[in-house]
Image (cartoon, rainbow, N blue to C red):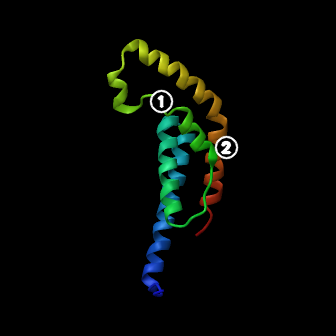
Amino acid sequence: MAEEKPQTIQQLENSKKKLRRKLVASARNIIANEVGLSVGVWNISRVMVWLRNEGVDIDFPVFEAYQKAVIETPSGKERLNCSREALRRYDLGLNQTNLEFHDKIIDACFEIIARYTKKE
């Protein structure tokens, strides 16, 4: 196996740092209500996949559980294809899911901030 060049190792570490900063920023956005819960969870889940691809062991199962719970709820522009009545039904379910997961997601966001804002 070829040995990695030092610059390549440094680039990998820089990439991981950048992704950790994105993760923390997304967690802060959720806590500050700058994004909705579903958008914030989607952002965090996406960054966690990227971190895992970079070899970072990261696991916050509440985000995956939330996504599974809302998988059949239209989001974004999909909502434009729904009638008012359908949106009301979807939103009732989404609001209940948000209430169910809110505290767990906020706790996980605080854990992300505590864990990944340490001096690098």
Farthest residue to the front: give it: 1
Q: Residue at x 43, y 18 (%)?
A: 87
Q: Where is residue 109 in the image (x, y as percent from the top left)?
A: 61, 46
Q: Where is residue 70 in the image (x, y as percent from the top left)?
A: 52, 32
Q: Given the image, on which type of amino acid does mark 1 rest? A: Glu
Q: Residue at x 47, y 30 (%)?
A: 72
Classed neighbour count for the residue bearing mark 1: other residues with Cα under 10 Å, few (<14), some (14–19), many (≥20): few
Q: Position of residue 10 (x, y in %)?
A: 47, 78
Q: Can residue 35 be seen in this view?
A: no
Q: What element carries label 1?
A: loop
Q: Which of marks 2 and 1 is nearer the N terminus?
A: 1
Q: 5 above or below 37?
A: below
2 vs 1, front mark:
1
Q: Which residue is drawn at 51% across and 48% down?
A: 45
Name the one closer to the observer, 49 or 19. Answer: 49
* Residue receiving disc 2: 107
Task: Measure the alpha-carbon separation of dots 2 and 1.
Answer: 25 Å
Name the one closer to the observer, 71 or 88. Answer: 71
How many numbered discs?
2
Classed neighbour count for the residue bearing mark 2: other residues with Cα under 10 Å, few (<14), some (14–19), many (≥20): some
Left or right: 119 in relation to 71:
right
Q: Can residue 118 be seen in this view?
A: yes
Q: Where is residue 80 in the image (x, y as percent from the top left)?
A: 33, 24
Q: Given the image, on which type of amino acid does mark 2 rest? A: Asp
* Residue receiving disc 1: 72
Name the one closer to the observer, 115 or 77. Answer: 77
